[in-house]
Image (cartoon, rainbow, N blue to C red):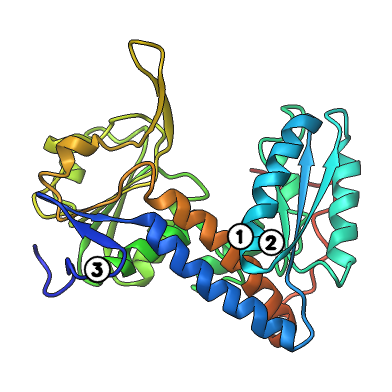
């Protein structure tokens, strides 16, 4: 391993197997949730009730499923949850209007826009209406832009989860060669920025990369967020590398059974890597826990931090080019 003391089998939330140290994302998520619950209680003592208001557009039955799952997770840490469900025929102006009402409501400390939206709607333009201080997913352009300067109000949850996994594995990115496969806005690009800020040497591979193998084989830290099952195999991985699998894919077996797999061929890579995250049970549960932590952080910032910008949202008549 090309760094000293960066990976420890004794790291909390990990278990040692033949080959790689497998990060237990569920255990890590539980610890984050316990810390979040303590923050929520502390804020309550200061008179601030942490809330998460979710906006869902589309099938009411699906909305009920979303609401049940999200409400349960929020209740686990003491966050008040409310669902605002709109029909599939809702207009963009209706959704923007609802979000602006939530922005103005001081009892609302966090806003979550459930995706996907119906295809006819302009998802980025609607996301841009969310107040950056209530944007628990870190998708507002103000938050993405501030991430460039390493001063986000709230950062994208998946990227934060990846960095939390690196911390759990006691990996210090400084001086390491990091390769990120995938340049999506919620994982690949934000993770690349985080790693640059921590002084790693970062390469981002994407659909136009001519030889992914050439890059991944030299990576000390390899992060994969593409959405293609088994894309990364043992021959793609440098012996002793840290491999974090962000992909979540559903595959159907010969008998018709469905299972969830990542972008990394787990059974192959675990014999080569020093650290590896499983799918399911790796980055996924950590991302959910980070979302709850971000909801508490949003409330804390609204209480304690002078606002750096006066947000009124993007004008519907002049949405930004994306």
Q: Residues within 10 Å of mark 2 (few under 14, many from 20)?
A: many
Tell whether label 3 touches label 1 (CB within 8 Å). no
Q: Quadrant of residue 87?
A: top right
Residue 221's disc number: none
In the depicted structure, whether residue 226 falls above or below residue 52: above
Query: Marks 1 and 3, how far apart in space?
Result: 24 Å
Q: Give coordinates of residue 317: x percent, y percent.
A: 87, 45
Q: Residues within 10 Å of mark 3 (few under 14, many from 20)?
A: many
Q: Give coordinates of residue 35: x percent, y percent.
A: 52, 75
In the depicted structure, whether residue 36 falls above or below residue 227: below
Tag 2 secondary structure: loop
Q: Which residue is at 78% across, 55% downward?
A: 129
Tag 1 secondary structure: loop
Q: Which residue is at 11% across, 74% downward?
A: 4
Q: Quadrant of residue 111?
A: bottom right
Provide the residue designation for mark 2: 135
Q: Of callouts 2 and 3, which one flags the residue occurring earlier in the amino acid sequence? A: 2
Q: Give coordinates of residue 183: x percent, y percent.
A: 43, 45
Q: Which residue is at 77% across, 42% downward?
A: 56
Drawn side of residue 141 relative to residue 163, left or right: right
Closer to the eye: label 1 or 3: 3
In which quadrant is the N terminus drawn?
A: bottom left
Q: Relative to the observer, which residue lies in front, 145 or 163?
A: 163
Residue 138's disc number: 1
Tell whether label 1 touches label 2 (CB within 8 Å). yes
Query: Marks 2 and 3, how far apart in space?
Result: 29 Å
Provide the residue designation for mark 3: 171
């Amino acid at each position: 391993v090309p760094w000293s003391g960066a990976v420890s089998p004794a790291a909390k939330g990990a278990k040692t197997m033949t080959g790689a140290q497998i990060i237990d994302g569920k255990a890590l998520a539980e610890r984050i949730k316990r810390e979040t619950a303590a923050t929520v209680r502390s804020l309550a003592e200061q008179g601030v009730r942490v809330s998460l208001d979710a906006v869902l557009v589309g099938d009411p039955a699906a909305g009920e499923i979303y609401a049940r799952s999200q409400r349960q997770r929020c209740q686990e840490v003491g966050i008040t949850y409310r669902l605002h469900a709109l029909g599939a025929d809702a207009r963009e102006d209706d959704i923007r209007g609802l979000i602006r009402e939530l922005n103005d409501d001081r009892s609302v400390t966090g806003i979550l826009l459930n995706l996907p939206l119906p295809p006819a709607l302009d998802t980025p333009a609607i996301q841009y209406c969310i107040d950056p201080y209530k944007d628990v997913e870190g998708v507002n352009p103000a938050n993405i832009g501030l991430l460039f300067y390493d001063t986000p109000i709230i950062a994208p949850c998946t990227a934060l989860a990846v960095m939390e996994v690196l911390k759990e594995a006691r990996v210090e990115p400084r001086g390491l060669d990091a390769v990120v496969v995938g340049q999506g806005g919620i994982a690949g690009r934000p993770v690349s920025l985080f790693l640059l800020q921590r002084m790693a040497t970062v390469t981002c591979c994407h659909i136009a990369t001519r030889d992914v193998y050439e890059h991944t084989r030299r990576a000390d830290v390899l992060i994969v967020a593409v959405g293609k099952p088994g894309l990364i195999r043992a021959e793609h991985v440098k012996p002793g590398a840290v491999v974090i699998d962000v992909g979540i894919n559903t595959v159907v077996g010969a008998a018709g059974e469905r299972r969830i797999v990542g972008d990394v061929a787990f059974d192959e890579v675990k014999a080569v890597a020093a650290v590896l995250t499983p799918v399911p049970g790796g980055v996924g549960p950590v991302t959910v826990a980070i979302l709850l932590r971000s909801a508490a952080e949003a409330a804390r910032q609204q209480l304690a931090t002078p606002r750096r910008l006066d947000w009124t949202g993007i004008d519907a008549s002049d949405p930004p080019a994306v």
